[in-house]
């Protein structure tokens, strides 16, 4: 009986790590790479499902084509799923949804 309960508890713990609100101890660090040929002027990220964007991750900097930045998305919530919004010098805006920052190590803009 104790073995079955332990196995069930282990299975529940594993399934909890796969939920969008649990990091399961995974890294939230990801490289964002600009390969568009146009300078990225702003980069925003927020937990999937939020109504507002977080702060501009570039601050007063820009991300030239061929450059990358490393971001730790851990915000204390443990969420692994984020939405990204990148703005470029030519006026283009690219929004990407449901990015698993716990599973991916990099995100490329082409």
Image (tube, rainbow, N blue to C red):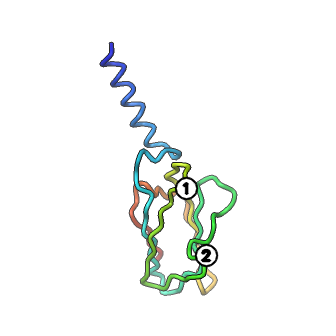
Tell which residue pokes out farthest to the front in this image. Answer: 76
- Residue 49 appears at what percent x and percent y? 63, 52
Q: Residue at x 63, y 64 (%)?
A: 54
- Which residue is rendered at x = 36% and y = 30% of the image? 10
Secondary-structure class at tag 2: strand
Image quarter of residue 43:
bottom right
Among all residues in the image, which is located at the extreme right? 51
On screen, 7 above or below 81?
above
Q: Quadrant of residue 47?
A: bottom right
Say which of 87 and 5 sits in front.
Answer: 5
Give the labeled residue for mark 2.
93
Residue underneath mark 1: 75
Using a 10 Å C-alpha cutoff, classify the residue at mark 1 as few (fewer than 14 neighbours), some (14 to 19) or many (20 or more): few
Separation of marks 1 and 2 at Cα, in angstroms: 24 Å
Q: In the displayed structure, does residue 35 sit left or right of residue 50?
A: left
Residue 59, which numbered label?
none
The spot of residue 21 in percent (x, y) is 53, 45
């Amino acid at each position: 009986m104790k073995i079955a309960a332990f196995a069930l508890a282990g299975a529940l713990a594993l399934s909890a790590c796969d939920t969008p609100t649990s990091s399961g101890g995974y890294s939230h660090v990801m490289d964002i790479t600009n390969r568009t040929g146009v300078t990225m002027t702003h980069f925003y990220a927020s937990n999937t499902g939020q109504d507002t964007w977080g702060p501009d991750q570039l601050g007063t900097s820009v991300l030239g084509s061929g450059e990358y930045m490393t971001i730790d998305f851990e915000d204390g919530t443990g969420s692994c799923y984020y939405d990204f919004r990148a703005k470029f010098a030519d006026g283009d805006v690219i929004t990407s949804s449901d990015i698993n920052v716990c599973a991916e190590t990099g995100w490329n803009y082409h």
